[in-house]
Amino acid sequence: MKTITTLLTATMLICGLYTQAQEKYFTRNGTVTFFSSTPMEDINAENHSVTAVIDAGSGAVEFTMLMKSFNFKKALMQEHFNENYVESDKFPKATFKGNIVDMGAVNFTKDGTYNVVVKGDLSLHGVTQAVETPATIKVAGDKVSASTKFKVKPEDHKIEIPAVVREKIAAEIEVNVSTELQPLKK
Amino acid sequence: MARKIILFVLIAAIAGGLIGYYMYQKPLGTLGGEKAVGSMSSEALFDAFEADETESMLSWGGKVIEITGTVSEVLVNEDGSTTLILATSDPIFGVKCKLDPSLNHINTFSPSQEVRLKGLCIGMNGDVEIDRCLIL
Protein backbone atom coordinates (compact mmCIF):
# COMPACT_ATOMS: atom_id res chain seq x y z
CA MET A 1 0.00 0.00 0.00
CA LYS A 2 2.85 2.30 0.98
CA THR A 3 4.53 1.59 -2.36
CA ILE A 4 1.36 2.50 -4.26
CA THR A 5 1.00 5.74 -2.29
CA THR A 6 4.65 6.61 -2.93
CA LEU A 7 4.23 5.89 -6.64
CA LEU A 8 1.07 7.99 -6.82
CA THR A 9 2.75 10.88 -4.97
CA ALA A 10 5.80 10.68 -7.26
CA THR A 11 3.56 10.62 -10.36
CA MET A 12 1.61 13.64 -9.12
CA LEU A 13 4.83 15.53 -8.35
CA ILE A 14 6.31 14.76 -11.77
CA CYS A 15 3.06 15.76 -13.46
CA GLY A 16 3.01 18.96 -11.39
CA LEU A 17 6.58 19.82 -12.38
CA TYR A 18 5.81 18.96 -16.00
CA THR A 19 2.75 21.24 -15.97
CA GLN A 20 4.79 24.07 -14.42
CA ALA A 21 7.57 23.61 -16.96
CA GLN A 22 5.03 23.88 -19.78
CA GLU A 23 3.80 27.18 -18.44
CA LYS A 24 3.79 30.36 -20.48
CA TYR A 25 5.03 33.58 -18.91
CA PHE A 26 3.60 36.91 -19.98
CA THR A 27 3.98 40.65 -19.53
CA ARG A 28 2.35 43.67 -21.11
CA ASN A 29 4.66 46.29 -19.56
CA GLY A 30 8.11 45.08 -20.51
CA THR A 31 10.78 47.68 -21.21
CA VAL A 32 12.81 48.23 -24.35
CA THR A 33 15.16 51.20 -24.53
CA PHE A 34 17.55 52.27 -27.22
CA PHE A 35 20.58 54.48 -27.04
CA SER A 36 22.55 56.23 -29.73
CA SER A 37 25.77 57.93 -28.77
CA THR A 38 27.89 60.17 -31.00
CA PRO A 39 30.30 63.00 -30.16
CA MET A 40 27.56 65.41 -31.33
CA GLU A 41 24.57 64.05 -29.43
CA ASP A 42 23.24 61.27 -27.20
CA ILE A 43 19.74 60.06 -28.01
CA ASN A 44 17.71 57.66 -25.92
CA ALA A 45 14.10 56.53 -25.90
CA GLU A 46 12.07 54.24 -23.67
CA ASN A 47 9.12 51.96 -24.32
CA HIS A 48 7.42 50.57 -21.21
CA SER A 49 4.48 48.93 -22.99
CA VAL A 50 6.18 45.91 -24.53
CA THR A 51 4.18 42.69 -24.67
CA ALA A 52 6.25 39.54 -24.24
CA VAL A 53 5.60 35.81 -23.94
CA ILE A 54 8.09 33.09 -23.01
CA ASP A 55 6.98 29.48 -23.39
CA ALA A 56 8.78 27.53 -20.67
CA GLY A 57 7.99 24.29 -22.45
CA SER A 58 9.27 24.97 -25.96
CA GLY A 59 11.59 27.90 -25.25
CA ALA A 60 9.72 30.08 -27.74
CA VAL A 61 10.13 33.80 -27.12
CA GLU A 62 8.00 36.58 -28.59
CA PHE A 63 8.15 40.33 -28.07
CA THR A 64 5.89 42.88 -29.74
CA MET A 65 5.68 46.63 -29.32
CA LEU A 66 4.13 49.67 -30.92
CA MET A 67 6.79 52.06 -32.23
CA LYS A 68 4.67 55.00 -31.09
CA SER A 69 5.10 53.79 -27.49
CA PHE A 70 8.69 54.99 -27.52
CA ASN A 71 8.97 58.18 -25.52
CA PHE A 72 11.80 60.65 -26.04
CA LYS A 73 12.71 63.56 -23.79
CA LYS A 74 12.39 65.98 -26.72
CA ALA A 75 9.04 66.30 -28.52
CA LEU A 76 10.56 67.09 -31.91
CA MET A 77 12.90 64.11 -31.69
CA GLN A 78 9.90 61.81 -31.05
CA GLU A 79 8.06 63.34 -34.00
CA HIS A 80 11.03 62.88 -36.34
CA PHE A 81 11.55 59.30 -35.11
CA ASN A 82 7.95 58.33 -35.91
CA GLU A 83 7.44 60.32 -39.09
CA ASN A 84 10.83 60.36 -40.82
CA TYR A 85 12.83 57.37 -39.62
CA VAL A 86 10.73 54.37 -38.54
CA GLU A 87 7.54 55.57 -40.31
CA SER A 88 5.27 54.40 -37.50
CA ASP A 89 2.03 54.93 -39.42
CA LYS A 90 3.23 52.57 -42.17
CA PHE A 91 5.08 50.12 -39.89
CA PRO A 92 3.38 50.43 -36.48
CA LYS A 93 4.94 47.42 -34.75
CA ALA A 94 8.33 45.90 -34.10
CA THR A 95 8.42 42.20 -33.26
CA PHE A 96 10.96 39.64 -32.20
CA LYS A 97 10.13 35.96 -32.59
CA GLY A 98 12.66 33.37 -31.62
CA ASN A 99 13.79 30.64 -29.30
CA ILE A 100 16.02 30.05 -26.34
CA VAL A 101 18.71 28.00 -28.08
CA ASP A 102 20.04 26.22 -25.01
CA MET A 103 16.80 25.42 -23.18
CA GLY A 104 18.62 22.77 -21.17
CA ALA A 105 20.46 25.58 -19.38
CA VAL A 106 17.23 26.89 -17.80
CA ASN A 107 15.17 25.35 -15.05
CA PHE A 108 11.94 27.33 -14.79
CA THR A 109 10.98 25.39 -11.66
CA LYS A 110 14.10 26.35 -9.70
CA ASP A 111 15.04 29.82 -8.50
CA GLY A 112 18.25 31.03 -10.07
CA THR A 113 19.96 33.11 -12.74
CA TYR A 114 20.50 31.41 -16.06
CA ASN A 115 22.64 32.67 -18.93
CA VAL A 116 21.25 31.61 -22.29
CA VAL A 117 21.43 32.43 -25.98
CA VAL A 118 18.34 33.63 -27.81
CA LYS A 119 18.08 33.38 -31.58
CA GLY A 120 15.30 34.70 -33.77
CA ASP A 121 13.98 37.26 -36.22
CA LEU A 122 13.65 40.95 -35.50
CA SER A 123 11.09 42.72 -37.69
CA LEU A 124 11.42 46.48 -37.72
CA HIS A 125 10.40 49.03 -40.34
CA GLY A 126 9.05 46.19 -42.48
CA VAL A 127 12.44 44.45 -42.70
CA THR A 128 13.22 41.19 -40.89
CA GLN A 129 16.77 40.39 -39.79
CA ALA A 130 18.19 37.45 -37.85
CA VAL A 131 19.39 38.25 -34.33
CA GLU A 132 21.40 36.06 -31.98
CA THR A 133 22.18 37.45 -28.55
CA PRO A 134 23.17 36.34 -25.07
CA ALA A 135 20.37 36.84 -22.53
CA THR A 136 19.80 36.38 -18.83
CA ILE A 137 16.77 34.65 -17.34
CA LYS A 138 16.08 34.95 -13.63
CA VAL A 139 13.57 32.66 -11.95
CA ALA A 140 12.21 33.76 -8.57
CA GLY A 141 9.13 31.91 -7.39
CA ASP A 142 6.47 32.23 -10.05
CA LYS A 143 8.13 35.29 -11.61
CA VAL A 144 10.56 35.18 -14.49
CA SER A 145 12.77 38.10 -15.52
CA ALA A 146 14.44 38.22 -18.89
CA SER A 147 16.99 40.74 -20.11
CA THR A 148 19.33 41.20 -23.02
CA LYS A 149 21.07 43.84 -25.06
CA PHE A 150 22.15 43.87 -28.68
CA LYS A 151 22.95 46.31 -31.43
CA VAL A 152 20.90 47.25 -34.47
CA LYS A 153 22.12 49.04 -37.58
CA PRO A 154 19.40 51.36 -38.99
CA GLU A 155 20.57 50.58 -42.53
CA ASP A 156 19.92 46.85 -41.96
CA HIS A 157 16.23 47.73 -41.58
CA LYS A 158 16.21 50.25 -44.44
CA ILE A 159 15.83 53.17 -42.04
CA GLU A 160 17.20 56.11 -43.96
CA ILE A 161 19.10 58.76 -42.04
CA PRO A 162 19.37 62.06 -43.91
CA ALA A 163 22.96 63.22 -44.49
CA VAL A 164 22.35 66.41 -42.51
CA VAL A 165 21.82 64.45 -39.24
CA ARG A 166 24.04 61.46 -40.08
CA GLU A 167 26.73 62.64 -37.64
CA LYS A 168 24.19 62.85 -34.80
CA ILE A 169 22.98 59.25 -35.06
CA ALA A 170 25.20 56.29 -34.27
CA ALA A 171 25.85 53.70 -36.98
CA GLU A 172 24.85 51.04 -34.44
CA ILE A 173 22.03 51.63 -31.96
CA GLU A 174 22.24 49.85 -28.61
CA VAL A 175 18.97 48.13 -27.68
CA ASN A 176 18.27 47.04 -24.09
CA VAL A 177 15.44 44.68 -23.19
CA SER A 178 14.22 44.17 -19.64
CA THR A 179 11.05 42.32 -18.70
CA GLU A 180 9.43 40.78 -15.65
CA LEU A 181 6.93 38.11 -16.63
CA GLN A 182 4.27 36.25 -14.70
CA PRO A 183 2.43 33.00 -15.42
CA LEU A 184 -0.14 33.57 -18.14
CA LYS A 185 -3.61 33.22 -16.67
CA LYS A 186 -5.76 31.12 -18.94
CA MET B 1 21.39 100.91 -46.66
CA ALA B 2 23.61 97.86 -47.20
CA ARG B 3 24.51 97.93 -43.50
CA LYS B 4 20.84 97.93 -42.55
CA ILE B 5 20.18 94.95 -44.78
CA ILE B 6 23.14 93.04 -43.30
CA LEU B 7 21.98 93.92 -39.77
CA PHE B 8 18.44 92.78 -40.58
CA VAL B 9 19.66 89.50 -42.07
CA LEU B 10 21.92 88.95 -39.03
CA ILE B 11 19.11 89.58 -36.53
CA ALA B 12 16.73 87.37 -38.53
CA ALA B 13 19.35 84.59 -38.63
CA ILE B 14 19.98 84.81 -34.85
CA ALA B 15 16.22 84.90 -34.11
CA GLY B 16 15.66 81.93 -36.45
CA GLY B 17 18.48 80.02 -34.79
CA LEU B 18 17.09 80.71 -31.32
CA ILE B 19 13.55 79.67 -32.34
CA GLY B 20 14.96 76.50 -33.96
CA TYR B 21 17.00 75.70 -30.85
CA TYR B 22 13.94 76.27 -28.61
CA MET B 23 11.77 74.04 -30.81
CA TYR B 24 14.45 71.32 -30.87
CA GLN B 25 14.91 71.35 -27.11
CA LYS B 26 11.19 71.58 -26.28
CA PRO B 27 10.33 68.70 -23.93
CA LEU B 28 7.45 66.32 -24.46
CA GLY B 29 4.63 68.13 -22.64
CA THR B 30 1.42 66.82 -21.13
CA LEU B 31 -1.90 66.58 -22.97
CA GLY B 32 -3.53 68.93 -20.43
CA GLY B 33 -4.34 71.56 -23.03
CA GLU B 34 -5.54 69.11 -25.67
CA LYS B 35 -9.25 68.62 -26.25
CA ALA B 36 -10.48 65.03 -26.69
CA VAL B 37 -12.00 64.37 -30.12
CA GLY B 38 -14.24 61.62 -28.80
CA SER B 39 -15.44 59.88 -25.66
CA MET B 40 -16.23 56.20 -25.15
CA SER B 41 -16.06 53.24 -22.79
CA SER B 42 -13.06 50.91 -22.76
CA GLU B 43 -15.32 48.08 -23.97
CA ALA B 44 -16.59 50.11 -26.94
CA LEU B 45 -13.07 51.18 -27.96
CA PHE B 46 -11.68 47.65 -27.72
CA ASP B 47 -14.65 46.18 -29.62
CA ALA B 48 -14.20 48.78 -32.38
CA PHE B 49 -10.51 47.86 -32.78
CA GLU B 50 -11.32 44.14 -32.67
CA ALA B 51 -13.93 44.59 -35.40
CA ASP B 52 -11.83 46.80 -37.71
CA GLU B 53 -8.36 47.91 -36.63
CA THR B 54 -7.68 49.90 -39.81
CA GLU B 55 -10.91 51.86 -39.60
CA SER B 56 -10.42 52.45 -35.85
CA MET B 57 -6.92 53.76 -36.47
CA LEU B 58 -8.33 56.18 -39.04
CA SER B 59 -10.91 57.34 -36.49
CA TRP B 60 -8.81 57.44 -33.31
CA GLY B 61 -5.14 56.79 -34.09
CA GLY B 62 -2.88 59.69 -33.14
CA LYS B 63 -5.81 61.53 -31.54
CA VAL B 64 -6.60 62.44 -27.95
CA ILE B 65 -9.65 60.55 -26.71
CA GLU B 66 -11.56 60.29 -23.46
CA ILE B 67 -12.05 56.81 -21.99
CA THR B 68 -14.13 55.52 -19.11
CA GLY B 69 -13.74 52.06 -17.67
CA THR B 70 -13.06 49.71 -14.80
CA VAL B 71 -9.47 49.07 -13.78
CA SER B 72 -8.68 45.37 -14.06
CA GLU B 73 -4.95 45.61 -13.37
CA VAL B 74 -2.50 48.20 -12.05
CA LEU B 75 1.07 47.89 -13.38
CA VAL B 76 4.08 49.80 -12.14
CA ASN B 77 6.57 50.23 -14.94
CA GLU B 78 10.35 50.10 -14.72
CA ASP B 79 10.61 53.91 -14.89
CA GLY B 80 8.17 54.35 -11.98
CA SER B 81 5.23 55.30 -14.18
CA THR B 82 1.87 53.55 -13.89
CA THR B 83 -0.15 51.68 -16.47
CA LEU B 84 -3.82 50.93 -15.90
CA ILE B 85 -5.46 48.08 -17.76
CA LEU B 86 -9.16 48.79 -18.30
CA ALA B 87 -11.46 45.80 -18.57
CA THR B 88 -13.09 44.75 -21.82
CA SER B 89 -15.06 41.73 -22.99
CA ASP B 90 -11.77 39.93 -23.75
CA PRO B 91 -10.45 37.67 -20.96
CA ILE B 92 -6.80 38.66 -21.49
CA PHE B 93 -6.53 41.92 -23.40
CA GLY B 94 -7.97 45.31 -22.54
CA VAL B 95 -7.28 48.99 -22.97
CA LYS B 96 -3.76 49.73 -21.77
CA CYS B 97 -3.50 53.28 -20.45
CA LYS B 98 0.03 54.43 -19.66
CA LEU B 99 -0.27 57.41 -17.34
CA ASP B 100 1.67 60.59 -17.94
CA PRO B 101 4.91 60.66 -15.88
CA SER B 102 3.56 63.77 -14.11
CA LEU B 103 1.18 61.39 -12.27
CA ASN B 104 3.99 59.15 -10.96
CA HIS B 105 3.31 60.33 -7.41
CA ILE B 106 -0.25 58.89 -7.43
CA ASN B 107 -0.25 55.31 -6.19
CA THR B 108 -3.84 54.92 -5.08
CA PHE B 109 -5.20 53.08 -8.12
CA SER B 110 -6.74 49.69 -7.48
CA PRO B 111 -8.58 46.98 -9.42
CA SER B 112 -12.37 47.50 -9.76
CA GLN B 113 -11.92 51.27 -9.56
CA GLU B 114 -13.89 53.30 -12.11
CA VAL B 115 -11.76 55.83 -13.95
CA ARG B 116 -12.22 58.53 -16.57
CA LEU B 117 -9.13 59.65 -18.40
CA LYS B 118 -7.88 61.15 -21.62
CA GLY B 119 -4.83 60.16 -23.61
CA LEU B 120 -3.31 59.65 -27.03
CA CYS B 121 -4.59 56.57 -28.87
CA ILE B 122 -1.54 54.96 -30.51
CA GLY B 123 -2.83 51.61 -31.76
CA MET B 124 -3.47 47.99 -30.96
CA ASN B 125 -0.92 45.41 -29.84
CA GLY B 126 -3.13 42.82 -28.17
CA ASP B 127 -4.32 45.64 -25.91
CA VAL B 128 -5.51 48.93 -27.37
CA GLU B 129 -2.85 51.37 -26.21
CA ILE B 130 -3.44 54.87 -24.89
CA ASP B 131 -0.33 56.89 -24.07
CA ARG B 132 0.38 59.94 -21.85
CA CYS B 133 -2.95 59.57 -20.03
CA LEU B 134 -4.30 62.14 -17.60
CA ILE B 135 -7.03 61.41 -15.05
CA LEU B 136 -10.18 63.53 -15.46
Image (cartoon, coloured by chain):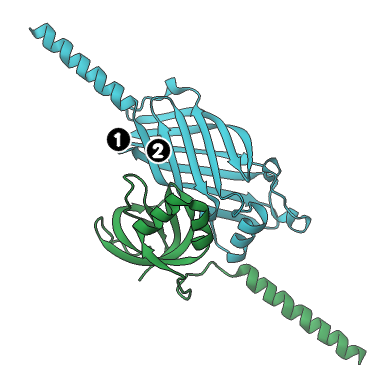
Chain colours: A cyan, B green
Q: Is residue B133 visible?
A: yes
State the residue in front, B132 or A35: B132
Numbered circle sitting on residue A145: 2
Q: What amino acid type is highlighted by mark number 1?
A: Asp
Q: Secondary structure at mark 1?
A: loop
Q: Quadrant of the C terminus of chain B?
A: bottom left
Numbered circle sitting on residue A142: 1
Please state the horizontal and vertical placement of residue B75, each as a whole percent of the image: 35, 52
Please state the horizontal and vertical placement of residue B85, each as a whole percent of the image: 35, 54
Give the image quarter of residue A2: top left
Give the image quarter of residue A77: bottom right
Residue sitting at x 69%, y 72%: B20
Residue sitting at x 55%, y 62%: A73
| Vertical relation: B95 (above or below) B11 | above
Q: What amino acid type is highlighted by mark number 2?
A: Ser
Please state the horizontal and vertical placement of residue A16, each as a whole percent of the image: 25, 23
